[in-house]
Amino acid sequence: MPKTSFSQVAIVEAVARLAQVCLVVRPLRSGPEKRLSSRFLGVAPDGNVVLAVPISEGPKGRKVFLPDGCYVGMVFSVGDMLLQAVTRVLGYCHHMQQPGRRVEALTVARPIKVTELSQRKHPRWEIDPAEQMAVSLWPAEILASGAPTTPRTGYAVNCSAEGLGVRLCQALPFPTGTEMILRIESRGPRESLIHRGVLKHCTPMADGQFLAGFGEVVELGPGQAVAIMESLAAPK
C-alpha cells in the first residue's frame, strides 16, 4: 500500500472542505494586494491545485490576477490545524465547479511541503448566527492609559476554551500579538462579558470581510483591571 504524506493529506482535506486560504504574494506587495483571499476549489487532472481567483483586502475587494510563475505563500486551516505552504502560479483556467457550470479559477503547483503553524489545544465550536453576539475590541494598553479610543466592532463566529473568532468588516490595524480587550455583548438583558485576549491573526475572507482570531482569552473579574473598567465606563 503506497504511503501518503502529511502534505498530500492536508491538500486533499483542504480541497474536500473547500477551505479558505490566505495568499501572500512573494516578493511582498504593498497596499490591499499584500494579502489575498481565495478558496480551494479542486484538483486539476495533472494533480495541481485549483483555487478561486484571489480577492484583494478591504470591504471593496477586487479580483487580482497574478502573473504566471510568481511564488505565493498559502495559509489555511484544516480542522484544528493552521497550515502553511509555498506554491507557484501556473495560470488561469475555467474550473467545472458543478455539472454545466464553470468558474474562472487560478491553478497553482501542488505544494511539495505543508507545515503546521499551530495546533489548537481545545476544540472549537461554531456560534449560531441567530445569537448575534456583538463584540467590541480595544487595544488593552491604550484603554488602560485612559486615552480616548474608538472600538472596532464585529460578531463572534466561533469559540474554544481559550480562543474566540470574530468576523469584522475591516481588518484590524494592530500587529499580531497585540493584547486586546473584548466585550461580548449578548442579546437581551444579560450583562456583557469582558475578556482579555491576544490577537493571533486577522485573515481576509472570500466575502471581503475578515476573521480575527484571539488566543489566551480569559474573563476579567471584578477588581482585576480597574483602569480598563474606568476607561470603559468614562463618558464618551
Image: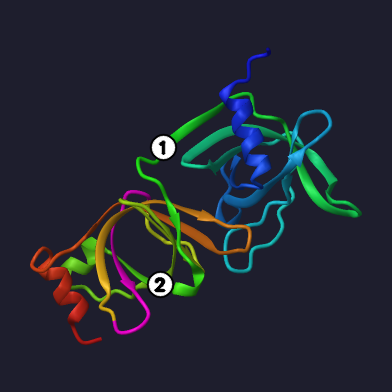
Q: Position of residue 39 (x, y in %)?
A: 66, 49
The verdict on residue 110 being magenta is no
Q: CA distance from mark 1 to mark 2?
A: 26 Å
* Coloring scheme used: rainbow
Q: Quadrant of the C terminus?
A: bottom left
- Left or right of 206? Residue 213 is left
Q: Residues within 10 Å of mark 2 (few under 14, many from 20)?
A: some
> Which stretch is magenta?
176-189
Q: Mark 2: which amino acid?
A: Met
Residue located farthest toward the right when viewing the structure as drawn: 100
Observer-nearest residue: 34 or 178?
178
Q: Name above or below for residue 14 compared with residue 180.
A: above
Q: Secondary structure at mark 1?
A: strand
- Left or right of 230? Residue 127 is right
Residue 133 is tagged as: 2
At 25% across and 76% down in the image, what residue appears?
148
Observer-nearest residue: 127 or 197?
127
**Residue 215 in sight:** no
Q: Mark 1: which amino acid?
A: Gln
Residue beneath label 1, please?
119
Q: Position of residue 100 (x, y in %)?
A: 91, 54
- Left or right of 185? Residue 3 is right
Q: Quadrant of the N terminus?
A: top right
Residue 221 is tagged as: none
At 44% across and 35% down in the image, what residue appears?
117
Q: Residues within 10 Å of mark 1 (few under 14, many from 20)?
A: few
Q: Position of residue 86 (x, y in %)?
A: 60, 32
